[in-house]
Amino acid sequence: MSTEGDHEEESKAVGPLTAALHREHIKQLYEKKESFEMYMLEHRKISGVYWALASLQIMDCLDDLPKEEIVEWVFKTYDKDSGGFGANEQLDPQLLSTLSAVQILAIYNELDRLDIEKVVEYIKSMQNEDGSFSGDQWGEVDTRFSYGALLCLKIMNRLEDVDVDKAIDYVLRCRNFDGGFGCIPGAESHAGQIFCCVGALALTKSLDRIDVDLLGWWLSERQLPCGGFNGRPDKKEDVCYSWWVLSSMAMLGKIDWIDREKLTEFILQCQSPDGGIADRPGDIPDVFHTFFGLGALSLMDFPDLKRIDPKYALVTEVVELIEM
Amino acid sequence: MHGIMYGTETSSEELSRLSSLSELGRRALECKVEADLSDEAEALVRKVVESNPDDYTLWNYRREWLLSLKGEAHDRLVKVWNDELRLTEKALLRHPKAYATWQHRVWLLAEAKDMEIDLATRTGLFEKELALCSKMLKMDARNFHAWAHWERVSKIAGKHEPARVVEYTEQQINADFSNYSAWHYRSVNLAEGIPIQDKTALDQLLDEEVDRLRQAFYTDPDSQSAWFYYRWLLNGAPYYSEGKTSALFNIKDEFLKNELKACQELIDLEPFSKWALLTKVYLLRRLGREAEAEDTIVKLTEIDPMRLGYYRNLASTSTRAV
Ligand SMILES: [Zn+2]
């Protein structure tokens, strides 16, 4: 944040970033046998691991968790037959779990351990005739999967293996007249879906196909007087939208259309005294909101945090290796 | 955790409930690994997914079980399908945002044809989906899963009923002007959903829409939803049809002038209404009154400093230069 205007007596009491506590929260979650949060993550553990590692990496302390143990665990969720990863051991393969697995391996610079041909084959098999992607073999379609598929391929440097033009055509069919995007054609704009669609467009260098000013405006209107963002008009604030809205704005080059200072204050207020970041001040923290809070702070150049790349949701040094 | 405050999670009863549920889930997974499609296995899986509807693997497992019933008597299948709907409904009432559960219902409807469930029954199943959407939206009028579910099942059933959506959104909007979801789905369906015989009917429709918006603005000028819809309307109410964009209304300058006047009346009453001022900028620019628009933008930067960057950009994109 800026150093100008040192009127501390006027500003609200906003504590510093309690990074040490957040590290401890993540460590506890990983090591402790039983907790509320652990049960909540049972069916999306691999994403939980990705949020945890990405958070630690932003705080430059990736070594807090045992790398080899985690990489070995990731492969326990791998389904050799399909080439996809599941959300936990014994769980069925899914596209978004596969993305988390690939992101984790990218964070650890261990992509070589992947059977890339097989994973590419899995993702290819998820693309539908109209360009959309299914989330698994059972056929749920959603723009979240378009982003998941394209990002996964991009990380493995294999984008050309799917029909990118058709994929983008489908994403554009999900655009609304408010400039935003929904989960399927005709569905309401939602900041989470916008992040996915803008991400898909950014990864394929197709942002010139949308009205970035219109969408940037809609996104800037997500900021509420408390400084936090909602995900849709006339809804409440929530830390996860700090990431989805701000990263979308970063991809569109509109990050200065909102009040960064107030957003920073809001995120810091959502820190739990026990570590971790919650959706709102006073709620229970979790690793999901911890990552999204830290990710948004990183996009705003918060001191001592590594910079994150909005379209990859990975720190820039990892992205540099991928793009090399 | 979304909306979970301190205190609720720490109770030891809650932890032991979760722990035994997790143990049950593990046992159900073992049945899956052994490809056990017996009634006992089915009952166990049912118990787990009802309380833990995020357990997507077990829903998948149920689908394998359901598919294994192919070829059985029609009555049996209809009963099983209806039981499955009750199960998912129970789960959704407790966990209205469980993706895997909503998806299970989409799958049930999609698969009914392949299972040779007859058309009349399938139509009944489709109506049950809409009834569920309506029930879920009564609990939370903004549940985007429920709104999108309507779209998804309509597509599967081949029932494109824009008039029904328009009518439903009207009820929703009249009950709460800040229901952006309803305004959105209204905008998507309006052109096809209202029978328009002639130009007079079209003019009348535009008047009605504007009247409703005016009520919304006066009820709560800070609620964004109606203002976004208004912007869409002022653009002629564009909609997608057969791969291209068309406009429902032909918006004339005369109309815009009237709207500007109405907007100014609201500003006279509520001088700090950001949305009225922002709309005024838009209307002024449409009418080519750039200098006044610029003055209004200055005012906006004062009352809404959070978005200073946006207003600076807005000021720099003068229509006079275009
Ligand atoms: Zn959240």
Image (cartoon, coloured by chain):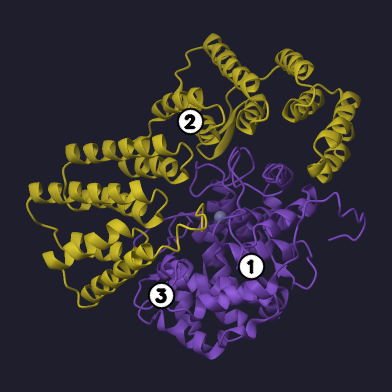
Chain colours: A purple, B yellow
Which of the two residues, A41 or B318, is positioned nearer the viewer here?
A: A41
Mark 3 or mark 1: which is in front?
A: 3
Q: Is residue A123 visible?
A: no
Q: Are marks 3 and 1 in contact (CB under 8 Å)?
A: no
Which of the two residues, B92 or B170, is positioned nearer the viewer here?
A: B92
Element type at mark 2: helix
**The N terminus of chain A: image quadrant:** bottom right
Q: Tell me the CA gap for discs 2 and 1.
A: 35 Å
Mark 3 is on which residue type? Asn
Tag shown at residue A64: none
Q: Earlier in the sequence, mark 3 or mark 1?
A: 3
Position above or below: A316 against A165: below
Does label 2 lie on the same chain as label 3? no
Element type at mark 1: loop
Position above or below: A78 against B204: below
Q: x%, y% of residue A80? A: 38, 82
Mark 1 chain:
A
Residue highlighted by disc 2: B189
Q: x%, y% of residue B304? A: 80, 37
**The C terminus of chain A: image quadrant:** bottom right
